[in-house]
Amino acid sequence: MTAAPIDEALVQGHRSTVQEAWIDYNGHMNVAYYVLAFDQATDFFTDRVGLDAAYRESANASFFVVDMNVGYRRELGAGAPLLFTTQLLDFDRKRMRFFHTMLHAEERFVAATNEILTVHVDMTARRSSPMAESVLRALEALSARQKHLPPPPEAGRVLGIRR
């Protein structure tokens, strides 16, 4: 089976493998480890836009997750190779909203999705603060590169029971 191509505009490169310790009593990857894997993908993404360890130290600033949605699509077992893509959905001077897709790296099926809203924080004041101009420029460039991408259908979803 040939894997579907991934749009080059998406941030990609973070890879992982489902660890045996991540498997629960149902014989598949436990929900907590999906969030861990997405957190690692978030670190990969934020490093690429300049919110890396050097920035956090020099600016005495970081970012906090204020909301997230995780959608579980297909089971994953131990040893499954993972590939993550990230689409920047929106941003302003203090916030970013982005969307990760977790793919089985070989079969390319979507295993899970993760939409995240973050806020930039001054670590001394522990309050929201504007991001550095260099980060905003990187986000603007990424946004321009991804402008042709439609929003993922799962983005902005609200939990509920359909009647």
Image (cartoon, grey):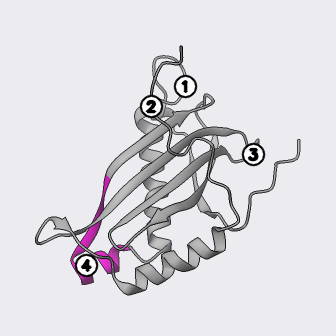
Quarter in which the N terminus is drawn: top right
Number of other residues with Cα within 10 Å of mark 4, as a class: few under 14, some 14 to 19, many 20 or more: few
Q: Look at the numbered discs 1 and 4 and tell me whether their residues touch, using CB distance below 8 Å.
A: no
* Magenta stretch bounds: 52-65
**What residue lies at 82% left-to-right and 48% top-to-bottom?**
3
Q: Earlier in the sequence, mark 2 or mark 4?
A: 2
Q: Does dot 2 land on a helix, a strand or a loop?
A: helix
Number of other residues with Cα within 10 Å of mark 1, as a class: few under 14, some 14 to 19, many 20 or more: some
Number of other residues with Cα within 10 Å of mark 3, as a class: few under 14, some 14 to 19, many 20 or more: few
Q: Amino acid at mark 3?
A: Glu
- Comparing 26 with 145, the one in front is 145
Q: Amino acid at mark 1?
A: His
Residue 135, image quadrant: bottom left
Q: Is residue 121 above or below residue 156?
A: below
- Comparing 90 with 107, the one in front is 90
Q: Position of residue 116 (x, y in %)?
A: 43, 51
Q: Amino acid at mark 4?
A: Glu
Q: Does dot 1 land on a helix, a strand or a loop?
A: loop
Q: Label 4 belongs to which residue?
A: 57
Q: Look at the numbered discs 2 and 4 and tell me whether their residues touch, using CB distance below 8 Å.
A: no
Q: Position of residue 127 (x, y in %)?
A: 16, 65
Residue at mark 3 to residue at mark 2: CA–CA distance: 21 Å
Which mark lies nearer to you, 1 or 4? 4
Q: Residue furthest left?
A: 125
Q: Label 2 belongs to which residue?
A: 31
Q: Label 3 belongs to which residue?
A: 106
Q: Label 1 belongs to which residue?
A: 28
On the picture, is 18 further left or further right than 128? Answer: right
Which mark lies nearer to you, 2 or 1? 2
Residue at mark 2 to residue at mark 4: CA–CA distance: 31 Å
